[in-house]
Structure formats: C-alpha cells, structure tokens
Amino acid sequence: MTDWLATTWEASWRPFQYFNLYRLVLAGLALLAALWPQRWTAVLHVADTPLFLPAAGVYLLVVAAGFLASIHWRHRFNFQLSSQVMADAVALGLLMFAGGGVGSGIGTLLLVSLATASLVGRGRLVLFYAALATLVTLGGQVVGVLVRGLEPATIVQAGLLSAGFFATAILARLLGQRLMVNEELARQRGISLENQSRISQRVIERMQDGVLVIGSAGEIERHNPMAAEMLGAAPAPGAQLSGYCPPLAGALADWKASQAVATQEFKPPTGGELRARFEQTSSSAGEVLVFLEDLGRLQERAQQLKLAALGRLTASIAHEIRNPLSAIGHAGELLREERRGAMQERLLKIVADNVARLDRIVADVLELGRRDRMQPEALHLEPFCTHFVDGFDGVQGVAPGIIAVETDGDPVLCFDRTHLHQILWNLLANAVRHASGAPGSVRLRATSAGAGTVELHVIDDGGGVPDEAREQIFEPFFTTHHLGTGLGLFIARELCTANGATLDLAADPGHGHFIIVGRSDT
C-alpha cells in the first residue's frame, strides 16, 4: 500500500464512527431482545438460554466504549478497528450460539461488520477478520452440534456462510481501494483547483483594469478592488448591476441587444469616463465578464509615452541640433555684414527668425526634460507677481499699465520659483500677443480659494481661444501662431503637474482665461 493510501486509510475516522454507531444500535436491540425474549426472540428459542443476556450486555458495553474512543481518542486506528471487529465476532458468535446456531440468522450480521471493516481496513487484516469470523462461526456450530444437539448438516451451512465472509471481505476491500483512489484523486484535483482559483484571484486583484462577473440575472457575483475604485464603492453581496451602476447596466443591455460592439464607453457616477469590454463566458450559468478601463489613465499613459520619447530626444538634442543651429546663425550674421541688397537682407532675416524659433524649441524641450528638478517654497504672490510683471515688461517691451496685477490680500503658493516664473512668462506672452494693448487689457489676479488652495488667473481681452482649438490647446507642438513652437502651454501644464497644481482653460466667452490652482501649504 502506498503512503498516500495509508494516510487516507488512517484518516477514515468518520466512516468508522458511523460503523460504531450502527453497532451501538445493534447491541441495544440485542439487549432489548434478551430482556423481552417472549416477544422478540421466540423464534430463536433463547428464552431459557442464560448466555444470551450477559453476552448482549457485555457486547453493548464494549461497543459503547469503542464508539466513545473513536470520537475522543483518535489514535491507533488499526488497533481500534481490529478490536471492534474481534468484539463483533466474539459477541455475535455467542449470540448466534445462544440463538440456535447458523439457523438463527444472527451470523449474517457478521457480513455487515466485515464489509464495513474491509472498506476502511488494510488488506491483510481484512483476511484476518474473515478468518476470525469463520473460526467463530464454524467453531460455534461444531460445539452446538456436540453440546446442544444441533443438526450436523448445519455445519455445511456454516461453511457456506464462512465462504461468504471471505467473498464479502475481498470484494469490499477491492471496492474500498477503488473508493480511496477516487477520493485521493478528487482531493488532489480539489487542491489543484483551489490553487488555481487562488492564483486567478490574485491575478485579477492585481490587474490594473477593473473586472466584474455578472450573473445571468444581472447580479454582481465577483469583482476586483480596481473595479470598486473605478466605480466609487464596492458592491454589496448579490447586488444588482442596475442598482449599483445604472450607466454600466445600460451599456451591458446595449451589448446584449446588439452583440456587435464588444466595448462601450460610459460615465460612472464618480465622474470621468470608462470603457467597458464585455465577454460571454462558456459556463453553463451564462455569466458575463466585464473589463473596465479608465480612459483618463489610458490618455495619461499615452502622454507618458510621449514624454518618454521627448526625454530620449533631449539626451542628444543639445549637440545634434544646437551646434548646427549656432553655426547657421553665425554664418547668417557674417553674411549680413556684407550688405548685398534688400533681397539678401530679407532672406537672411528669414534664416535668423527660423534659427531663433528652432533654438526656442530646443530650449523648451530641454526645460521639459528638467521638469522633475524642483525645489518648492512658499511664495508670497503679491510681491512675486509685482516684481515678475516689472521684469516681464522690461524684457518684452510692454508698456506699463497694460498688465494689471490684482491680489486678494497676500496669498501664499507652494511652488518652485523657477517653474512658476516660466509658466507665467508663457501665459503672459500669449496674453499680451492676443490682447488689445489697452491699459489693463491683461490681468494677473491672485486669490485664496479656500481649503488650502490658491488660484492664479491670467486674463486677456483678446477674444478667447476658438472652440475648435480648446481640446488641443495643451497638446505638444500645437500652435495657432506662425512663430510659435507649440510647447509653451504644454510645458506650463507639465510644470504645474510636477508641482502638484493644475492649469486649465476657463470657459470665459470673449476672453482668454487660464487658471492655475495650487497648494498654499508646504
């Protein structure tokens, strides 16, 4: 017998307890039969047999002790089983002898004990149990013929019953082995299935996409933490999808109706935009798998890939582009000194303007690569904005008074000074270019927004951003000006994000209105 089979056999305590319970009931009935022989055992002719009552009483005590031992002392399974089978053989043999031998029918009760013991016992012990029952049956019958005057022909019946003992034991043992093999196979498959289920559950829990399992009646059977995060809260056990997330339930209903488009976009109650992908499972219950993707996260990932490409570009851009640009610009300056004519002057100016434009692009891209190098500090916006506008007017040649500084008290903004300087420079340069040029046509307003936030507003009267350009205004290399690089607003938003702030275009008809929202605490 293999080790696992021995382990399975040693662990068969529950069937052994059921076996002892059956024997306890049988012993109780035997004792009752001995106490009222005229009613129950008249056909056995044991009314005048003094052996039947004590044998039934002792058998009941032995069986009760074995039953309690199988419950409270789970050790030495083989010893307990063998002792109980021996008790059955001796007790039933005595009862059979007291009841008139084989003809009493009590011997057939040994078949049940042998069959049960053979199902959970070991191979050679099974033959021992059959041999013991045979000795008790044949010996008791021979003694009954010699002492009690039983018919000698009953010895043949005892022999046939003994042959039945061996046949029952062997067949029951073969069946028991087959059951043990199947039980072990089922146990191993159960372990494998449980392990696979745990692995699948861990994979689903770690997925960046949300996963829902929807039953055929629309109930939510399973979900992963990401789905609960995307949809705002975890669903209650057995909750209906229609009550938990009506937009997703509507998208599922549309998919079931069409079966054509496997993906549906919807807006959950928590805001944002999600994409749901539906797959019909092949299970008999007809569940539907729902995979949720955060479109905002996908766009952010695409943006990160775009930034990574720009980062790789900045590694070689200084030497590969700036050096040739410097050579071109220097050659243009030398040609300009010769003063060959108006046509040459116009061409050289085109060259110089484009060299300057390319140089600004290179500078912006290099600055974008250094966006993570920041040193945030508490900036008092009233003096900062005033000094910044003074410097901006002097460098850009803007007339005093065109840019008006408005502050609500002295709000404090936690920001990197260099980054904020570059952001405001880009925003004010765009505002001045599009404004009317009248005094106060560009306003820089700083105010506290409460809840630990500060807002910076850059407003001009230039008519605002066209509706068709609002969605692309922060995209890299998108510009509406023939001399623009298309990186100013993009870099401004990236620098705001690096400092934990936001930069958005406000819906202000007739005005260009950009809002920076940042933290006031460090």
Image (cartoon, rainbow, N blue to C red):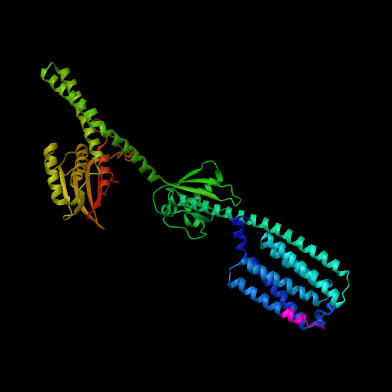
At 18% from the left edge and 24% from the top edge, which residue is drawn?
A: 327
Q: Main secondary structure of the magenta part?
A: helix
Q: Which residues, given as a range, are shown in magenta? A: 48-57
> In this view of the protein, which residue sits in the foreground, 157 or 514?
157
For the N terminus, give its image quadrant.
bottom right
Question: Does the stretch in magenta take in 53?
Answer: yes
Q: Is residue 477 visible?
A: no
Q: Position of residue 444 (x, y in %)?
A: 19, 47
Quarter of image, res 356? top left
Q: Is residue 455 visible?
A: yes
View extreme (top): residue: 340
Question: Does the stretch in magenta take in 163?
Answer: no
> In this view of the protein, which residue sits in the foreground, 109 or 264?
109
At 64% from the left edge and 73% from the top edge, which residue is drawn?
A: 67
Q: Position of residue 331 (x, y in %)?
A: 16, 21
Q: Position of residue 324 (x, y in %)?
A: 21, 25
Q: Position of residue 101 (x, y in %)?
A: 82, 73
For the C terminus, give its image quadrant.
bottom left
Q: Is residue 108 rendered to the left or right of residue 373? A: right
